[in-house]
Amino acid sequence: MGRTRKKIVFWTAVVVVILFGTVGYLTMGGQQALPARQEILPGVVQVKDGFVGIGIIEAGHGRVVLIDAGNDAAGKVILGEMAKRGLKVGDVSAIFLTHGHPDHRRGVALFPRSAVYILAADADLAVGKASPKGPLPRLLPNGDDHVRITRPLHDGETVKVGAVAVRVFELPGHTAGSAAYLAGGALFLGDAAMISPAGKLLGPKWIFSDDAEQGRRSLAILAHRLLGDPSVKAIVTSHAGALVSGLVPLEDFAAGR
């Protein structure tokens, strides 16, 4: 190999390393680590599926509700967690998708008898009929993961699943149909928020989001809507775990603290 070719190979490798390092920091850097398993509140757990969390909420009579279904189509983590509880696939009553990106929906097909819900604005994205718009997601494939929506949700409604009431809030910005779900005392924000290593609530990451600025405004609006609501005991994000301190982190975010 000539000296010139060696230099080309060397500098190409350097550029690739820098590129991957930059993308890695933009995607996972500057945020609290996602625990492998976190018992957030009584009856509310989040388990880590690779780099994304799946919420599990007890719904009574041996049934559960999932918040998102993870990135693994084989469902190793979620099925393992259910097996430890003595639960089967049919014991998942419903799955609420925080938005339509593939890393949150690939496990849905494992639960063919479960009701599947998502905000109407993200329904086509979730079934592979629409393309993502964020800077990085638009470069990735969005095929059919065999997700079938039971019915689209709308802002402000409450869905009763067994002993659990799931309140629905629109949270556009990360995607047009991003949602927050309040259930079992936990406010699930999906990718609409992150948590810093210092435990401060942050807005959505721009590299994955349709409109990160709109996402920040949506969080502030949500804080206003929930102001003083004592039912919120914890805030849960999909990639950075949870904060068990009521609405304070969301209120601080809205106030710019």
Image: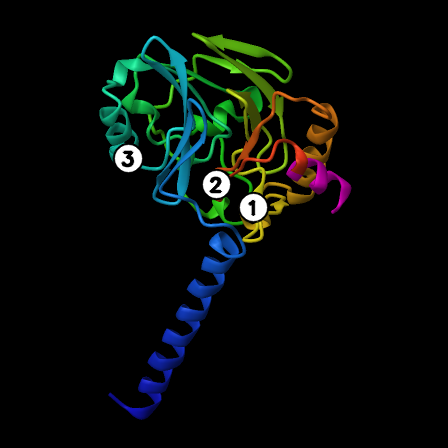
Numbered tag placed on residue 53 in the rendering: none
The residues bearing labels 1 and 2 have C-alpha atoms spaced at a distance of: 8 Å
Colour mapping used in the image: rainbow
Whichever of labels 3 and 2 marks the residue nearer the N terminus, that label is 3
Whichever of labels 1 and 2 marks the residue nearer the N terminus, that label is 1
Looking at the image, which is closer to me, 16 or 182?
Answer: 182
Query: Circle 1 is placed at which residue position?
Result: 195
Q: Residue at x 34, y 44 (%)?
A: 50
Quarter of the rendering containing residue 129: top left
Residue 83 appears in the rendering: yes
At label 2, counting other C-alpha atoms closer than 10 Å, the crowd grade (few under 14, some 14-19, many 20 or more) is: many
Q: Are marks 3 and 1 in contact (CB under 8 Å)?
A: no
> What residue occupies the far right of the structure in this picture?
255
Q: Tell me which secondary structure the magenta stretch mostly adopts.
A: helix
Q: Residue at x 27, y 25 (%)?
A: 82
Magenta range is: 249-257
Q: Are marks 1 and 2 in contact (CB under 8 Å)?
A: yes
Query: Circle 3 is placed at which residue position?
Result: 77
The residues bearing labels 3 and 1 have C-alpha atoms spaced at a distance of: 23 Å
Residue 81 lies, in percent from the top left, at 28, 29
Foreground mark, 3 or 2?
A: 2
Q: In terms of secondary structure, where does tag 1 sit?
A: strand
Query: Circle 2 is placed at which residue position?
Result: 241
Looking at the image, which is closer to me, 21 or 16?
Answer: 21
Above or below: residue 46 compared with residue 26: above
Whichever of labels 3 and 1 marks the residue nearer the N terminus, that label is 3
- Badge count: 3
Quarter of the rendering containing residue 219: top right
Where does the N terminus fall, quadrant-wise?
Answer: bottom left
